[in-house]
Image (cartoon, rainbow, N blue to C red):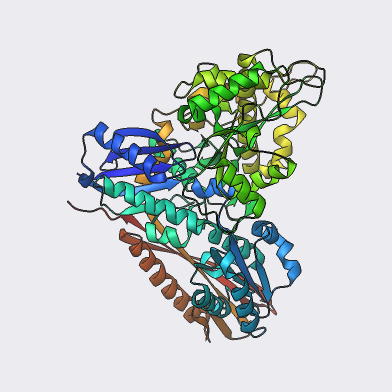
């Protein structure tokens, strides 16, 4: 009997599940995610699930971790400070595909070098310029990204630059060709920058997860879920954390299929920070052919085709006072719910809320609080940010008590982006507590916070809402409306050719709205989703039944919907894909592009055989290193040819080798 442990560290909750022989759920448990030290939440959840199943830690044969940490970090703009070495490109290329935006002002150098499309050196690598840059900026950077022109055709300059960075700085380096074998250097650069930014964060998560498990006697191998739903080893996740973006959502898709047996459905997973929507066809989630898109960035990471929006139970509620009636807007940033902050600092929170309620005039910072996150490096802070962090210290404060002028607002945003402080405010979770739909946290604090926000004035001069309950209903209704739009966008995107308009426009189109309202007149308009929706997440039963009614579809809420991510982590497979290219730089010459450099052959069959062998060996070795057993290889070829003078001419071939197997389990 093999007992498998699945753990999911989300933005708000850490979930744990024990499954016997991959078939029977023994127990599930939840604990609050402790961002200041993830080991605490992991240990609490795992300890609870082990006790619930009467299982000893040493009896666990395998542990698997899925996480929304990387996804949330990119959505919220967080992560470490990085440096980019951009080789063989023009400075103007930094603005293509969002490279400059991904850097967020971090150091970058554009130097000579790079290769051409055939893998030949276009210019010598300017090592002197690279060394000067490294010695001037190394102290301000926690990780490095290297992207060289046509590195997927010849990675020599990326490898040399990485060696110099390691020698001079000792900091971790991400080479773009290690993350994708496809062309498009600027897009690879974005992916490398984001990977470098995430390395420290994911490394800390895995280290602390390992510590937490070891403390409970769990010594089984630790696996991590990739963004395509497959498993990788902890060591591989540390080196390529970008591959864990959409890890939690991908695991939830795998878990949804396992829980429901549904082959055709839209799966919607609501967490604290994001709502993730994907389509299940033939029992399998589709892989996004353009690469995962998260937080406004299009990466080159193979991941489940999923639409991620900053909409969750802990999304910040923004008051809209324009217009006669006003309203609320949700997200995309996550804040700590006031009701949760009150659990940790009840005296401070209630005293501040009571004082704000006694004031006759609503304040700009009513119902908002701030606290520092211990254990996060504050290196490289500016003077204003450092001073604000010192004022916050190790206590919870009403936000208005620490912001002294308008410039402090910018400093606060930068501290939030670095993950150094957390802000609490009104969220849908607070609204659920006010309405009695949830009760795990401090409902009294939620009621006071919403009462404060409800008295803000809209354009007509009237209150935003008559009372806390009225505002709570408004917030919940907005979350349900935004969720319905996210589901419609996903459905329209799947059938884009049938409608000819962008999915976002279709989801908000007047005919769509009238169809959902079942308009009757000279024109009869009806619209509904044609497949069921599987609702996942702890709060799905709270919000999703009304969404199903709105969209006229079956809403499936499986029994263990709240821990689907942890379940998906346990039941997944190890899978490694390696892709390579064969080109024909001249007639009769067939070039295989390898990490060790180009190799030429006089016969296309020989060239294809060579790259299949190299990719197969690499994929199998990587799968074995990830802990896979009983490995199977599958080879796919995409050969492009052209007709010339009644002859078929070889143009280019892309070869993909997939190695898959079940994760190895320890034997007691």
Q: Is residue 573 visible?
A: no
Say if 423 sits above or below 128 in the image: above
Q: Position of residue 652 (x, y in %)?
A: 60, 73
Say if 171 sits above or below 415 in the image: below
Q: Is residue 392 visible?
A: yes
Image quadrant where residue 26 sits = top left
Say if 576 sits above or below 112 in the image: above
Point out the residue furthest to the top here.
466
Would residue 622 be found to the left or right of residue 291 on screen? left
Image quadrant where residue 506 sits = top right
Q: Nearer the viewer, residue 566 or 381?
A: 381
Q: Nearer the viewer, residue 353 or 613?
A: 353
Indicate the quadrant containing the N terminus: top left, top right, bottom left or bottom right: top left
Q: How many discs mark residues in the rendered view?
A: 0
Point out the residue furthest to the left here.
668
Q: Nearer the viewer, residue 282 or 339?
A: 339
- Residue at 45 percent across and 46 percent down: it is 67
Q: Nearer the viewer, residue 389 or 516?
A: 389
Image quadrant where residue 21 sits = top left
- Residue at 62 percent across and 67 percent down: it is 84
Q: Position of residue 62 (x, y in %)?
A: 28, 49
Q: Position of residue 71 (x, y in %)?
A: 54, 48
Q: Position of residue 233 (x, y in %)?
A: 37, 58
Say if 342 sits above or below 605 in the image: above
């Amino acid at each position: 009997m093999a007992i498998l442990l699945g753990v999911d560290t989300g933005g708000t909750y850490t979930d744990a599940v024990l499954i016997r022989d991959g078939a029977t759920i023994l127990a599930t448990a939840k604990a609050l995610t402790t961002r200041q030290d993830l080991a605490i939440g992991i240990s609490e959840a795992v300890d609870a699930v082990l006790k619930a199943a009467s299982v000893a830690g040493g009896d666990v044969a395998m542990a698997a971790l899925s996480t929304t940490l990387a996804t949330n970090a990119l959505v919220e703009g967080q992560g470490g400070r990085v440096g980019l070495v951009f080789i063989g490109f023009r400075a103007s290329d930094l603005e293509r595909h969002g490279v400059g935006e991904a850097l967020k002002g971090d150091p970058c150098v554009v130097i000579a070098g790079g290769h051409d499309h055939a893998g030949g050196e276009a210019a010598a690598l300017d090592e002197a310029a690279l060394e000067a840059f490294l010695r001037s900026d190394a102290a301000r950077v926690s990780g490095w990204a290297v992207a060289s022109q046509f590195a997927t055709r010849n990675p020599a300059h990326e490898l040399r630059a990485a060696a110099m960075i390691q020698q001079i700085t000792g900091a971790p380096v991400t080479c773009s060709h290690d993350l994708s074998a496809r062309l498009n250097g600027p897009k690879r650069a974005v992916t490398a920058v984001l990977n470098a930014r995430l390395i420290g964060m994911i490394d800390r998560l895995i280290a602390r997860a390992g510590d937490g498990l070891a403390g409970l006697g769990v010594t089984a191998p630790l696996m991590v879920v990739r963004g395509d739903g497959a498993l990788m080893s902890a060591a591989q996740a540390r080196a390529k954390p970008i591959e864990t973006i959409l890890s939690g959502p991908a695991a939830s898709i795998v878990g949804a299929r396992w829980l429901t047996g549904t082959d055709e459905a839209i799966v919607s997973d609501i967490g604290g920070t994001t709502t993730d929507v994907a389509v299940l066809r033939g029992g399998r989630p589709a892989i996004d052919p353009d690469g995962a898109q998260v937080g406004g960035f299009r990466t080159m990471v193979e991941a489940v085709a999923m639409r991620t929006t900053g909409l969750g139970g802990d999304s910040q509620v923004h008051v809209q006072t324009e217009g006669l009636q006003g309203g609320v807007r949700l997200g995309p940033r996550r804040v700590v719910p006031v009701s949760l902050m009150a659990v940790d600092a009840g005296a401070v929170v209630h005293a501040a809320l009571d004082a704000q309620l006694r004031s006759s005039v609503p304040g700009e910072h009513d119902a908002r609080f701030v606290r520092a996150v211990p254990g996060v490096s504050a290196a490289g802070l500016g003077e204003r940010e450092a001073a604000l962090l010192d004022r916050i210290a190790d206590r919870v404060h009403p936000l208005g008590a620490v912001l002294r002028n308008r410039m402090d607002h910018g400093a606060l945003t930068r501290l939030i982006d670095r993950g150094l402080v957390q802000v609490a405010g009104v969220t849908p979770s607070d609204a659920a507590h006010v309405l009695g739909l949830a009760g795990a946290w401090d409902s009294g604090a939620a009621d006071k916070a919403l009462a404060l926000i409800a008295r803000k004035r809209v354009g007509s001069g009237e209150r935003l809402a008559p009372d806390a309950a009225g505002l709570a209903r408004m917030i919940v209704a907005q979350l349900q409306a935004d969720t319905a739009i996210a589901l419609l966008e996903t459905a329209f995107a799947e059938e884009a050719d049938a409608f000819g308009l962008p999915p976002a426009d279709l989801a908000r189109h007047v005919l769509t709205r009238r169809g959902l309202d079942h308009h009757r007149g000279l024109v009869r308009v009806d619209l509904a989703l044609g497949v069921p929706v599987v609702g996942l997440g702890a709060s799905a039963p709270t919000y999703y039944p009304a969404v199903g009614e709105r969209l006229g579809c079956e809403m499936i809420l499986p029994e263990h919907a709240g821990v689907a991510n942890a379940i998906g982590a346990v039941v997944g497979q190890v899978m490694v894909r390696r892709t390579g290219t064969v080109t024909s730089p001249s007639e009769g010459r067939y070039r295989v592009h390898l990490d060790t450099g180009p190799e030429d052959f006089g016969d296309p069959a020989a060239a294809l055989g060579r790259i299949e062998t190299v990719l197969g060996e690499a994929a199998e070795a990587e799968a074995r290193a990830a802990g896979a057993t009983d490995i199977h290889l599958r080879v796919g070829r995409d050969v492009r040819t052209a007709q010339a003078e009644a002859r078929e001419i070889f143009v280019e071939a892309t070869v993909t080798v997939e190695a898959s197997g079940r994760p190895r389990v320890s034997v007691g």
